[in-house]
Image (cartoon, rainbow, N blue to C red):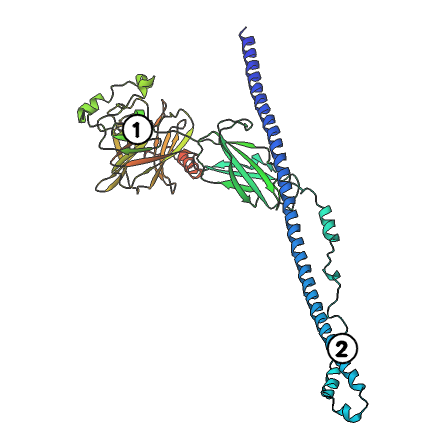
Amino acid sequence: MDEQRETLQRIVSTLANKNDEIHNFIDILNYTIKNVQVNSSSAISELDEEFDRLYSVLYEMSGTMANTIRQEAAQKIQALQDQLSQCRNALESSEELLELATQSLDIKDPVEFLKVENIEQIVTVASAFRLSLKPEVSDSMTHLMVDFSMERHMLQAIKFLPVPRAPEIDVAACVVADNCITVSWRMPEEDSRIDHFVLEYRKTNFGGFPRVKDEQHWEVIDNIKATEYTIPGLKFDKKYVNVRVKACNKAVAGEYSDPATLETKAFVFSLDSTSSHLNLKVEDTYVEWDSSGGKGQLKIKGKENKSRSGALSPKRASVGPSARGGRDRFIGESYTVLGDTAIESGQHYWEVKAQKDCKSYSVGVTYRNLGKFDQLGKTSSSWCIHINNWLQTILSAKHNNKTKTLDISVPDRVGVYCDFDGGQLSFYNANSKELLYTFRTKFTQPLLPGFMTWCGGLTVSTGLQVPSAISMVQKSENRLSGSTNSLNNIAY
């Protein structure tokens, strides 16, 4: 009976997953059909625009050439009309002189003939009429004719451009490390006409085939010249990243590659404002001490503070809403706020940056049973490093109300590495990756990131992977795990 029930449960689970995949595929098909319609209309519109531009160029060229023909024709006509006018004037003068000369010839008396006026002028002027009887310009306009045979052949040879094939993402060569993603791809065949690639990526919490209805939009990286690209400085606030690539030549882009889904392991949390001290202002991953808050709180000092620190048992503190409490979760001088996500296994990393004027702050982890009057590092269930910026800057490691002063300069940012299963809590200079201190113990309960601040603020960076440099340091530290420099090795 039980075996049949388990078998049926597996079948139901498999069918549910298959139905989910089919629904997603139906969405993809509908989305593709819609895109085919939209993109085909867009292609036709772009084609019409290209031909309109071509017609516009031809029309403009036709107008320019026609104007050239008109201008030359006008110049030729003007030259011919000027020549015609000269000929008419010459003809008119010639006729007058001809008549005068004829009348002079009719005189028989030599004495009278010699009395004719301007006879010498007539002869002189008559000889000036040696006009050219050839037109100054030709009536031919054939030199302005255009041979479009070559262009016509080129236009008739126009075809759709060759579209680059879709690249193939080499998932095995893709690397996700140090909050960077290196994507590698290859072309299915050699194509020398490819000018560049376009890479797109988006974050998602779904590990299967990328969904059409994914709420995240694609981020675009254009003009990539190589077949590999590293996306730096990402915040891994989702479990996965989808990537896809397309190839482009000088004129057209090809289709996208099949999307690849890469896993991005990182620890993401926010500061839990419901767990914070009233004197703290908390916004997502920022906490700031505020002297105006919690004025009505009863200030409980020293011994009373200490005597009440164990008021909540571990069992009670980790069950239900009371584990988180309200804004009275921490009171007195425990200016503390906790993270909203517990660590129960694995290796995790986050960073903390303090304001320059922050006078005192602590960074570490704690079990949920930290008392409302307790401070980080002053109980057996919390570990931290503390920075005091009063008269002089002091960096110290604290656990179980024991302190170890560290002779190391205080970094601008503190990196926190927690290996829950390996029982290690290490603090680093987040910039140089220099190890500041390591606690070694066996964690028996879920851990919450903890922060204390007084006279200043802290900014927490989450969604970070364990840096490769720190992983190497941890391996080296593990070989020296017999060292006695940890506060956990001090007798309580």
What mark, if any, has residue 337 been given in the picture? 1
Which of discs 2 and 1 lies nearer the camera? The answer is 2
Image quadrant occupied by the N terminus: top right
Mark 2 or 1, nearer chain start: 2
Q: Residue 164, how many percent across, how many down?
A: 64, 41
291 or 444: nearer the eye? 291
Q: CA distance from mark 2 to mark 1?
A: 123 Å
Q: In the picture provided, is 231 more to the left or to the right than 385?
A: right
Determine whether 308 is above or below 256 in the image: above
Image quadrant occupied by the C terminus: top left
485 or 309: nearer the eye? 309
Determine whether 16 is above or below 120 in the image: above
Q: Residue at x 37, y 41 (%)?
A: 434
What mark, if any, has residue 95 been given in the picture? 2
Q: Residue at x 74, y 55 (%)?
A: 147
Q: Residue 317, how many percent across, how many down?
A: 31, 19
What mark, if any, has residue 438 been given in the picture? none
Q: Quadrant of residue 249?
A: top right
Determine whether 458 is above or below 9 in the image: below
Q: Residue 430, how many percent across, how many down?
A: 37, 39
Q: Amino acid at mark 1?
A: Val
Q: Amino acid at mark 2?
A: Glu
Q: Residue at x 57, y 25 (%)?
A: 27
Element marked by disc 1 = strand
Crowd around label 2: few <14 · some 14–19 · many ≥20 (10 Å): few
Q: Residue 168, how many percent across, how many down?
A: 61, 36
Element marked by disc 2 = helix
Q: Quadrant of residue 273?
A: top left
